[in-house]
Amino acid sequence: MLQIDNLTKRYGNFTALNGVSLRIAAGEFFGLLGPNGAGKSTLMSLVAGLRTPDAGGITLGGRPFVAADPAARLLLGLVPQHIALYQELSAEQNLRIFGELYGLRGVELHAQVDEALAAVQLADRRRDPVKHFSGGMQRRLNLVAALLHRPRLLLCDEPTVGVDPQSRNAIFELLEARVRAGLTVIYSTHYMEEA
């Protein structure tokens, strides 16, 4: 599913990644463990196409990954380290926006939003502004926003930072179910027990 060859990224004189190579099979859950500052988020941003590597290459689904290629980007879902939701909008409005950005429309969009809210136990809070949600609720919503378009590879950059045990378990259960259904996941964390 994903092949990373000799990936290197520098920020000025600082080398964040130096010749990283990985091979991750379809349907695999890959834990990326390391302390803060180890380069986990840099690797995620390169695979997501948000940054350009200084050296090396990325192959996704058997083809060289080109960030500007819309078809390649649709293969990916990204759960960023920081919450990426519109705080003033409702849970449903947030999901509709993300779904439309992925090209979902009409009945398909409605069905995906309903399924996503049910999956993270927020269907009864669908019309509430996200700013009134707990951190764990926002993290769960952030996760399903990245899954709306049914990507083949999900990048999770420390998705449980600062959440309660109940929300953490809900996130793990959702990811486990999706991996069993064939989703490939790269999950970065600095918690040994999560990895």
Image (cartoon, rainbow, N blue to C red):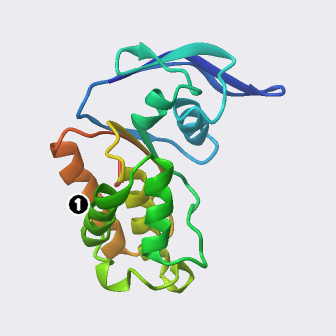
Residue 175 x, y percent position in the rendering: 28, 53
The residue lying toward the viewer, choosing from 173 and 92, is 92
- Residue under the point 28% across and 76% down: 121
Seen at 63% across and 20% down, the residue is 8
* Residue 100 versus residue 29 in the image, above or below: below
- The amino acid type found where label 1 is placed reads Glu
Give the labeled residue for mark 1.
173
Which residue is at the front of the view, 146 or 90? 90
> Height in image: 12 above or below 132?
above
Q: Is residue 192 visible?
A: no
The number of numbered discs placed on residues in the rendered structure image is 1
Image x and y of residue 155, in percent: 44, 42
Residue closest to the far left: 180
Residue at left 45%, top 74%? 91
Q: Is residue 157 above or below residue 125?
A: above
Which of the 4 image quarters holds residue 77? top left
Q: Position of residue 87 (x, y in %)?
A: 59, 75
Quadrant of the frame with the N terminus: top left
Q: Nearer the viewer, residue 108 or 6?
A: 108
Callout 1: SS: helix
Q: Is residue 50 left or right of residue 187?
A: right
Q: Which residue lies most toward the right here? A: 12
Q: Residues within 10 Å of mark 1 (few under 14, many from 20)?
A: some
Q: Quadrant of residue 59?
A: top left
Q: Position of residue 62 (x, y in %)?
A: 35, 15
Name the foreground residue: 137 vs 161.
137
